[in-house]
Amino acid sequence: KQQKVQSEKIYDTQCPYCSMQCKMQLIEQRVISRKKHKTVGKDNPTSEGRLCVKGMNAHQHALHTDRIKQPLRKVNGEFKPISWEEAYQLIVERYQEIKRIDGKDALSVYGSASITNEEAYLLGKFARVGLQTRHIDYNGRLCMASAATGANLTFGMDRGFTNTLGEIPHTRCIILAGTNIAECQPTIMPYFEKAKENGAYIIAIDPRETSTTNLADLHLKNKPGTDVALASGILKILIDLDLVDHKFIQQRTEHFEDVKKYIQSVNLDTIATDTGISLDDLYQTALVFGRESSGMIFTARGVEQQINGTDTVRSFLNLLLVTGKIGKKYSGYGAITGQGNGQGAREHGQKADQLPGYRSIEKEEDRKYIAKVWGIEEQTLPRKGVSAYEMFEKIIDGEITSMFVMCSNPIVSNPNANLIQKALKKLKFLVVVDLFLSETAKLADLVLPTTSYLEDEGTLTNVEGRVMLREASYPIQGEAKHDWEILCDIARLLGKGSFFNFKNAEEIFEELRIASKGGKADYSGITYDRIRKKQGILWPCTNCNTAGTERLFETNFAHENGKAKMAVIPISDTKKPSINNEFPLYLTTGRVMSHYLTGEQTRKSPSLAARNFEAFLEIHPDTAELYGIKPDSLVRVTSKKGWIIVRSKWSTSIRRDTVFVPFHWTEKQNVNRLVDDTLDPYCRMPGFKMSTVRISPIN
Ligand code: SF4
């Protein structure tokens, strides 16, 4: 029998999960003495009211009773609640002691791409001005660093999408390289479905058949790790058949002759053998992409999370440049960011090598500008630190002795989890700011409760570079504080209060606007009021009278001479692991629709956990039979770095030489335990997408 709703409240908010940042409403109904909740989509220009299953259930973790409600200090191995005053006093005492004994660079900060722009900005300032350490980096280093570096090297700047989502339905040809949008950012899919309805030819590159590849006209199911070879084969055919735009190449790009010379040495038969893609399919891809009047290429973690991820991205960008399919209507590039603020969080200074506005920490004029905005002497601004994974190596070496982790779970998300665990245990002082006692928080000396997406206010920049405002709407749970408040409080107690005198997120955004002015990611023309009126503004936006920039590079690229830089990407340069008798299968990793990142939030949601309650090993039935693996049976998967135990899932959608495990689980189900820690030489990202393993049944 339907129970009568006594009262109803509606809270406007924005999904905390993927980079689409769908607008939504939490509906809270009082029925007798109980509160009932549901989340529904809210109309807006990008997600158009759509939500996926994660968004529909996002309130379940935010309202979960496991939320940490007050600071927790570990005493004799047990967490005890303490007051904020006691927590802050402990931080200040320990930081001053560590700084005195080990030096200021012994302090480190580990950030996140799920926090707001304001918090990402403030975290960078907190590390460099509050703690005066060079060691800050964030979990985006594991996620989209190669796409960002590839775009910076090629175009001179990195806004993930060069065009708006709205242009996708009108393009004639789409290459989806290593992206499973249907599972990872489901509400973007209708843009591609509309393109297909309008007659676009879609080519998907992925070792697995997925709901995304099912949309494609042509699926290139290549061997993991062979994406550079694949792109080089397509490039060679484009050049050999003269399907290139000579005028565009001559006027808008550099280094074409070097690329052309190198590509002559490439043998298409070898590429076909190495990639597992037939010559016919290579030709079909090049012919369609080269001949169509417009085209777009989208990359994601499948090609980016490689030990040569930057080169892989650049090899796909070469295809856009030779065909002149960029800087034009319905032609361009998109890196499909995974994390909620994957774009904005990489622009404002929480990266080891970067200052706000996408400025460089090593460039003198950038250092001077930011020092002036912050009111400090340029000489006191620390230099570049090391990348996220390398910070843990420095802990093992004894150079870093303390870490401040904000809204991240590095023990699950990094490769070589055994090393990360050893490093975190070795720290003299670990502080974790989080919603829950995550796997990382459990190792902390002090855990500080933060506010959820429902309670926190700030801007996030979505997948296409649109700066969106998420207003605080729901009452704060327990004694939780906003991330920015925690940073300001600690900085004040460290004697740096005058640099952190903010009363709300908007005041931080006002400083961010100035700090970003003239930088590559210029937000100076964006205000909270303008975002509210326009439902989001695309950066760069250099003054309050412009609408923002919908399409990039229409006349110039962002390098000083205005030209894009093609790159010679030698296929043979990468020393990737290859399968052998000891490790005879490729392992690739990825997401499932119902979970987000390390699953810390989504595993708390009963509805989402019920959809996928454990990790699994996707394996071709022929391969499974070869190794004696029955369907739904437990399997040990072993690599050079470690082992895990997961349940088998037979599927003909995967290559026979490859297995797949999603990465949202912990402990013995954490597939990142198997991943090698070799880093991309340019962006320092590990190669999550390809390891070699052996498998055995557990009887
Ligand atoms: Fe939208 Fe992404 Fe949230 Fe799904 S997870 S509702 S696609 S923002």
Image: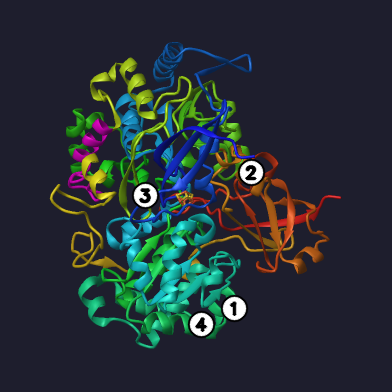
Q: CA distance from mark 1 to mark 2?
A: 41 Å
Where's residue 254, x and y in %? Answer: 26, 70
Report the amino acid beneath label 3.
Answer: Gln
Q: Of callouts 4 and 2, which one flags the residue occurring earlier in the amino acid sequence?
A: 4
- What amino acid type is highlighted by mark number 4? Leu
Magenta span covers which residues? 506-526
Q: Which label was assigned to residue 268? A: 4
Give the residue at x 24% y 40%.
528
Q: In what element is the residue under mark 4?
A: helix
Kind of residue at disc 2: Ala
Secondary structure at badge 1 equals: helix
Which residue is at 63% across, 18% downward?
77
Residue 340 relative to residue 269: left or right: left
Q: Nearer the viewer, mark 2 or mark 3?
A: 2
The residue labelled by disc 3 is 343
Residue 88 location in percent, x, y?
A: 42, 15
Q: Nearer the viewer, mark 4 or mark 2?
A: 2
Q: CA distance from mark 4 to mark 2?
A: 46 Å
Pick whichever, 503 or 120, lies toward us: 503
